[in-house]
Structures are given as structure tokens and as C-alpha cells.
Image (cartoon, helix red, strand yellow):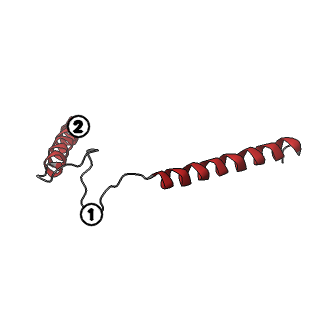
């Protein structure tokens, strides 16, 4: 049992060292700390996009309210 524990500890330590060495790159970091390997550039959300998201959220909320109201009025399932 002692050899097994020692082997498991050594394997864990080697895996941690390999993972740390593999994540260290010279690539520049983006603003939010995530490395961008694809050619996608981040852009600012415009007001039209924000309004579309707001309308979608409001519609989802309204549908959820309507579903809950129907469920209460009809006595459950």
C-alpha cells in the first residue's frame, strides 16, 4: 500500500509540472485573460444589440409568467 501511495503522489506531481509547463506560452494575453487562438476579434455591444437582448429576455420572462399563471389557474397538471 505504501508503494502505491508513493507512486500515486509521484504521478500527480509529474502531471502537475507537465500541465504548468504546457500552459506557459509567449502569446499575448487578451483583456479578459483568455488567450485568443482563433481569428475572432471582440467588439463592443451596440445599443441595437443590447435592445434585442433586452426584448428577448422580456419575452422569455412574459412567457414564463404566463405559463406559471396557467399552471396555477388549472390546478397543476
Residues packed near mark 2 inside 10 Å, few (<14), some (14 to 19) or many (20 plus): few
- Going by the image, does 62 lie left or right of 76? left
Residue 66: % across, % down: 77, 47
Name the residue carrying label 2: 5
- Going by the image, does 70 lie left or right of 60? right
Tell me what residue is drawn at x 71 percent, y 47 percent.
62
Residue 52: % across, % down: 55, 55
Q: Furthest residue to the right?
A: 74
Q: Nearer the viewer, residue 72 or 20?
A: 72
Tell me what residue is drawn at x 14 percent, y 54 percent.
27
- Which quadrant of the structure image shows residue 75? top right
Is there CB contact under 8 Å for labels 2 and 1?
Answer: no
Residues packed near mark 1 inside 10 Å, few (<14), some (14 to 19) or many (20 plus): few
Q: Residue 23, relative to residue 37: is it above or below?
A: above
Tell me what residue is drawn at x 50 percent, y 55 percent.
48
Q: Which image quarter is the N terminus in?
A: top left
- Going by the image, does 25 lie left or right of 12? left
Inter-mark Cα distance, 2 to 1? 42 Å
Residue 15: % across, % down: 19, 47
- Going by the image, does 38 lie left or right of 60? left
Q: Nearer the viewer, residue 29 or 46?
A: 46
Identify the element where label 1 is drawn: loop
Q: Furthest residue to the front?
A: 47
Q: Furthest residue to the left?
A: 26
Select label 2 or label 1 by which is in front: 1
Identify the element where label 2 is drawn: helix
Name the residue carrying label 1: 38
Residue 71: % across, % down: 82, 45
Amino acid at each position: 500500500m505504501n508503494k502505491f501511495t508513493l507512486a500515486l503522489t509521484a504521478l500527480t506531481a509529474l502531471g502537475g509540472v507537465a500541465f504548468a509547463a504546457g500552459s506557459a506560452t509567449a502569446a499575448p494575453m487578451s483583456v479578459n485573460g483568455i488567450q485568443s487562438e482563433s481569428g475572432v476579434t471582440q467588439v463592443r455591444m451596440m445599443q441595437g444589440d443590447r435592445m434585442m437582448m433586452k426584448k428577448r429576455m422580456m419575452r422569455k420572462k412574459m412567457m414564463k409568467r404566463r405559463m406559471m399563471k396557467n399552471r396555477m389557474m388549472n390546478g397543476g397538471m
